[in-house]
Image (tube, rainbow, N blue to C red):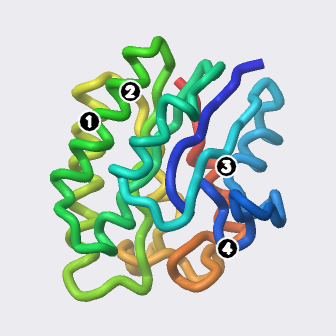
Amino acid sequence: MLIVACLGDSITEGSPGWQHDTGGDPESTWMHWAGLADPRLELRNFGIHGETTAEIAARLDEAVDGADVLVVQGGINDVYHGLDVERAAENLRAMVRRGKQLGLRVVLANVLPWNNGRPGDEEKIRRLNELIEAIGRDEDIAVLDFNGALADPDDSGRMRADWTVEGNHPNVAGHRRLGELAFRLP
């Protein structure tokens, strides 16, 4: 078994179908589907709705206790709160480096399209995803294309309607795509 600590925000948590404190429908998490696709994996969910990259980073050491692999996902809440995406990328890079320093294999996920974003948010998400790709290259780690897995082929700045609950979060079908198609360990 490989123990995989999945650290992130509501996309990792599985919100709104799964909540870290009350549970819910496990099919509402991409980890459920990734685990079915590869039974060697024990995927541990450390996603919390609404957290920025700085808040996610503060939980890293506790989340990775006993893990072999770290998956880092986050950034949309930085965009939502109007925080600088360059700083969000620095936080993500610091989490990647901390995971590597702890001897973990590290994987980074990019940011999903946001159907309910404000004017200018789509460009911020694109910029943050460019920075995430650069982190992947610089740190020699895999980047999971969560964005590409759920982007509408007719409008890449939006999630396809049948893969989202309300334009902010994937539904069960969206999480299944993330777990089966986008999730790959190095």
Q: Which residue is mark 3?
A: 179
Residue 148 in which image quadrant:
bottom left
166 in relation to 18, above or below: below
Which residue corresponds to the image point at 51% horizontal and 57% vertical from the top-left? 9
Which residue corresponds to the image point at 39% horizontal and 42% vertical from the top-left? 57
Q: Give the numbered dot on residue 135.
A: 1
Q: Position of residue 46 (x, y in %)?
A: 61, 45
- What is the residue that sits farthest to the top in this orientation? 103
The residue tagged with tag 1: helix, strand or loop? Answer: helix
Q: Which mark sits nearer the N-terminus, 1 or 2?
A: 1
The residue tagged with tag 3: helix, strand or loop? Answer: helix
Q: Which residue is mark 4?
A: 16
- Residues at circles 1 and 2 in contact by the CB criterion of under 8 Å: yes
Q: Which residue is mark 2?
A: 141
Q: Which mark sits nearer the N-terminus, 4 or 1?
A: 4
For the residue pair 22 and 138, the one nearer the viewer reads as: 22
Whole-angstrom CA distance, mark 4 to mark 3, is 17 Å
Identity, as a three-letter code, of the amino acid under mark 2: Ile
Q: Position of residue 142 (x, y in %)?
A: 42, 31
Q: Position of residue 97 (x, y in %)?
A: 32, 25
